[in-house]
Amino acid sequence: MPLETSSRVVQALTRLGYNAQREAVTLIAESDAPELLLQEAVEVAPDDALVITVDHVRTAQDRDPVPDPAGVDDATSSAASDVGTTPTNTPDSAGATDPVDTADASESTAHDSAASTAADPSISTGTEPGKSPPDTGGVPVETGGSTIGSRSPTPPAVANDMTGQSTGTGAYDEFVGVFRDRYERLSGQLRGRVNHRPADSIEAMGGGADVETIGLVNDIRSTASGHWLIELEDTTGTFPCLVMKDRDIADLVDELLLDECIAISGTLADDAGIVFVDAIHFPDVPRTYRPSTADRHVQAALISDVHVGSQEFLADAWSRFADWLHTEEAETVEYLLIAGDMVEGVGVYPNQDEELDIIDIYDQYETFAEHLKEVPGDMEIVMIPGNHDAVRLAEPQPGFDEELREIMSAHDPQIVSNPAMVDVEGVSVLMYHGVSLDEVIAELPAEKASYDEPHKAMYQLLKKRHVAPQFGGRTRVAPEERDYLVIDEVPDVFHTGHVHKLGWGKYHNVLAVNSGCWQAQTDFQKSVNIDPDAGYAPILDLDTLDMTVRKFV
């Protein structure tokens, strides 16, 4: 059966340390002697090749055929013949989860946190993240009927990728330019809701006049009476705006971050020196927003924070995840989106060297590449960097350099900048590693943003239409010709990582997912009270935007 043979070809090449182009797999699978052609293709490939290409297969076809299968190398023959019949151990009902539907999730009813996730019997394995699962008897999963070889994903289209486009030198004028760009683009989203008056013209208006204006938050401070004074800045100057403590909108001041763009409506004081605020407007996601979906049933796995190189990297859980991707149950999982921190890195936090399993950063990426080879070769992979990866820390972060790309070239992944908007089968996925979530969680009240509910912090970024609004704090920002961190177009899915916590929900019909990690708790995390959710793989139905969470520890 051709599909079954394709699956065997993929598995055989994986066992031999190769990946293959999809067309190459098809040529081998449809040949009269797949095992022999596979061996010939491997032999004609250069010694340093990681991917078997169509050219390798066609060259092998042009060679004289081997007359007797008995002459096939034992290891190759064994690998090619037993794929699909050798059972692989994956979690059963104690280690793989039932679907968790988020279709009806909202701000108030979303699956809020990893704590509630772990308590939900539909997705809990009964083990803590980072611990080995209970002995389930090693229930085998037959892969012989897998349709893995029939995956035919369309390469995702990527927007907002600034890799190779960086022009910033750190000059003062460049920072001014990027904030002007931020203001112009975000104020453009607000101008349909308010009749904007620039700061310099407000000063010329008479006392008691109605005022609407748009600006970046330059300062927030409380008065002696407990009211809030917000200073807004536009391209013409600054103007003070007073929010009275007894107004309903006073709670919104708790959500404000410096440097974000907002609009206010209010009334000028009699002396025209200050605006009394009646309403605060955010760029926000329209409540009427309706996401796009795929035209066919196809799925994407959303993961992040693999942290290969750490002593706490969960290699066994990763292998169980990769094995599951080879099963028939996962045949529709055609995309893998990795939101940063492929490796643990070096010198990221104090005394990190004491927690490293692999000291050299390039060796970490080499090992990550080997683990990535366990994933089916016919999946489309998109990855962005994170703060542990070997790129600049300042955001936006360009994709990896050519040396690192070559190390991870086996699957020919799309390696793009952080953040990036990725179109997957018509579904727009905003991928952002998530360093600014630390800032949001630190600045906002716990009920609006916390590590236990990371998706609520993501709601704030969607509301502000910017993935890192506050400058000068925990998030480093690099000046570029434009502000790549503005959310111009509303995404259908917002995917982040960084905080090592699992959380998801819907905000104005946008699915926000923080996908946990693949690293058990480190000593450093213990010292800062971070209890990670490790070994989870959110699986997104692109045709419905429903989500299933699977756990592999």
Image (tube, rainbow, N blue to C red):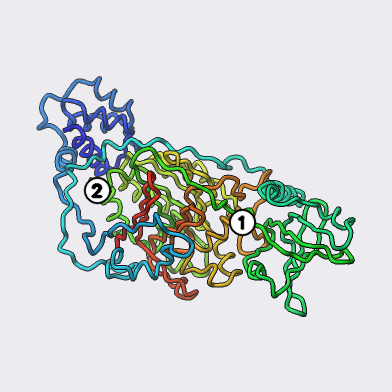
- Residue 533 in sight here: yes
Number of on-image labels: 2
Q: Is residue 430 left or right of residue 193?
A: left
Viewer-side residue, 481 vs 71? 481
Q: Is residue 87 above or below residue 460?
A: above
Q: Which mark is residue 43?
A: none
Q: Position of residue 205 (x, y in %)?
A: 88, 56
State the residue position of label 1: 464
Question: Within 10 Å of the Cα at label 2, are there few (<14), some (14-19), or many (20+) other Cα atoms?
Answer: some
Q: Residue at x 23, y 45 (%)?
A: 328
Secondary structure beneath dot 2 equals helix
Q: Position of residue 325 (x, y in %)?
A: 29, 48
| Residue 424 occupies quadrant | top left
Mark 2 or 1: the one toward you: 1
Q: Residue furthest bottom?
A: 224
**Which residue type does callout 2 highlight?**
Glu
| Residue 319 occupies quadrant | bottom left
**Which residue type does callout 1 highlight?**
Lys
Locate the C terminus by quadrant.
Answer: bottom left
Locate the N terminus by quadrant.
Answer: top left
Q: Earlier in the sequence, mark 2 or mark 1?
A: 2
Q: Which mark is residue 329?
A: 2
Q: Residue at x 50, y 70 (%)?
A: 351
Q: Is residue 218 above or below residue 446?
A: above
Q: Position of residue 194 (x, y in %)?
A: 72, 52
